[in-house]
Image (tube, helix red, strand yellow):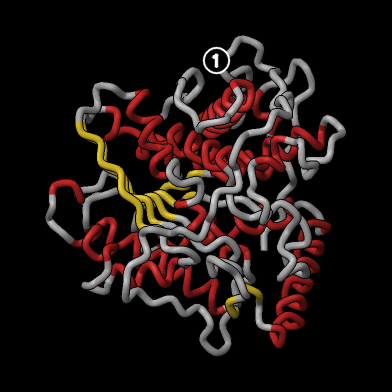
């Protein structure tokens, strides 16, 4: 497992790249190579068609779910796009292996989305994320390898449709994962492992000769987290913007979290900043909206020019604090996450076959814990990889 530094906020006078650690910048350098292909066809078209494939991380904050928030941003920002078709398939708790099975099942809505000849199902982009824990599991875990293989399978189906696949990196949980504390003891560790896992998915897809783009949504959450740390505050404090990105369960996005995610996906797909757009969720303060828009813009600029300077945002003062966010109440952030309207009758839901991570009690079925019998072995593997890395890092330079 690759180890990554955590980025920090810039001191006055520093450029945008100072918001991110070296490892995050390295990750964004890879993303920047894919950015041109992600946005080029959209810029030339009057039609725009995107399918979101996910789970309750996508459907949360309804009626302004992730897909609907993206739709509203696009409609405001791109009035010349005369035909905009945005759809979502997001049953609660779904992972990539289940999505692939759904896509191959004729009775499933996802099969229709990816196989029908209907004009409104000719996608420009298919935007996909995995279950919230699996990408950070050890690669020896069957759940991880099944998701990685399913990512390749979905990429093939999406390519066969003539669409671009975009994987978006989810966020770590507010306080880590209490069901897998040995693996995810805190937010930063979980965020790092999730990003590494999505890198592995991307590598597998590219290794199969297919194309994929990576949208680093979780890194936007990390920027807000690290800004609070750099200013001596506790990101998890209830009045902090970072904490307010979550609902009460510390996992699902609040309306603020959904809005940030939509802004980042909008920025990367359209290659344009959301700063200045007027649409937002009800109850969102003007300061919160601007901060989230600026975060998406900074992330896009860092991806386009990871080693550049002075390209934070379009608001004049490049050293605007990401953390100066009013502590105003943001309304009903605790939207019910269990109302996953896109659930499809006979779609498989079991993620608990013998030897796989077992479903933990949860309204949305979206939490997994590694099987206790394999924790010790997995921890030993992590320790071995860490020791090997320490040795390689301390080896003399050739």
Residue receiving disc 1? 314
Please tell me in which quadrant of the rendered image residue 342 appears: bottom left
Q: In front here: 44 or 208?
A: 44
Instruction: Kindly tell me whether residue 255 is visible in this rendering.
Output: yes
Q: Is residue 247 left or right of residue 97?
A: right
Q: Label 1, secondary structure: give it.
A: loop
Specify the farthest residue to the front: 332
Q: Residue at x 66, y 77 (%)?
A: 370
Q: Position of residue 308 (x, y in %)?
A: 60, 24
Q: Position of residue 368 (x, y in %)?
A: 61, 72
Q: Position of residue 114 (x, y in %)?
A: 24, 59
Q: Residue at x 65, y 25 (%)?
A: 16
Quadrant (top left/top right/bottom left/bottom right) for the N terminus? bottom right
Task: Report how many numbered discs are placed on residues in the image.
Answer: 1
Q: Position of residue 189 (x, y in %)?
A: 73, 56
User: On screen, 250 above or below 95?
Assistant: above
Q: Residue at x 27, y 72 (%)?
A: 104
Specify the farthest residue to the right: 232
Please tell me in which quadrant of the rendered image residue 199 appears: bottom right
Q: In front here: 308 or 157?
A: 157
Instruction: Kindly tell me whether residue 192 is visible in this rendering.
Output: no
């Amino acid at each position: 497992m690759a180890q990554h530094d955590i980025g920090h906020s810039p001191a006055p006078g520093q450029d945008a790249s100072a918001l991110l650690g070296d490892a995050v910048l390295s990750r964004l350098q890879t993303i920047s190579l894919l950015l041109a292909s992600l946005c080029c066809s959209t810029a030339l078209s009057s039609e725009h068609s995107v399918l979101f494939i996910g789970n309750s991380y996508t459907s949360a904050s309804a009626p302004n779910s992730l897909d609907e928030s993206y739709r509203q941003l696009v409609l405001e920002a791109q009035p010349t796009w005369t035909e905009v078709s945005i759809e979502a398939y997001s049953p609660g708790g779904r992972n990539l292996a289940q999505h692939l099975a759904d896509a191959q099942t004729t009775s499933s809505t996802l099969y229709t989305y990816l196989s029908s000849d209907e004009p409104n199902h000719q996608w420009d982009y298919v935007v996909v994320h995995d279950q919230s824990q699996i990408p950070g599991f050890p690669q020896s875990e069957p759940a991880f390898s099944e998701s990685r293989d399913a990512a390749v399978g979905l990429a093939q189906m999406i390519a066969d449709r003539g669409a671009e696949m975009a994987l978006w990196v989810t966020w770590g949980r507010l306080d880590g994962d209490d069901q897998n504390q040995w693996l995810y003891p805190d937010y930063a560790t979980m965020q790092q492992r999730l990003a590494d896992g999505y890198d592995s998915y991307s590598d597998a897809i590219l290794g199969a000769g297919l194309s994929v783009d990576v949208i680093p949504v979780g890194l936007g959450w990390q920027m807000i987290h690290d800004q609070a740390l750099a200013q001596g505050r506790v990101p998890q404090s209830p009045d902090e913007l970072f904490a307010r990105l979550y609902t009460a369960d510390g996992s699902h996005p609040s309306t603020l979290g959904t809005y940030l995610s939509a802004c980042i996906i909008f920025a990367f797909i359209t290659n344009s900043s959301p700063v200045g757009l007027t649409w937002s969720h009800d109850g969102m303060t003007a300061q919160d909206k601007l901060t989230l828009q600026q975060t998406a813009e900074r992330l896009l600029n860092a991806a386009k020019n990871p080693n550049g300077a002075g390209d934070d945002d379009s608001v004049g003062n490049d050293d605007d604090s990401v953390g100066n966010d009013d502590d105003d109440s943001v309304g009903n952030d605790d939207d019910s996450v269990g109302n996953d309207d896109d659930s499809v009758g006979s779609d498989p839901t079991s993620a608990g076959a013998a030897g796989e991570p077992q479903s933990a009690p949860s309204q949305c079925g979206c939490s997994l814990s590694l099987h206790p019998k394999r924790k010790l072995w997995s921890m030993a593997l992590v320790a071995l990889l860490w020791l090997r890395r320490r040795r390689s890092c301390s080896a003399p330079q050739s």
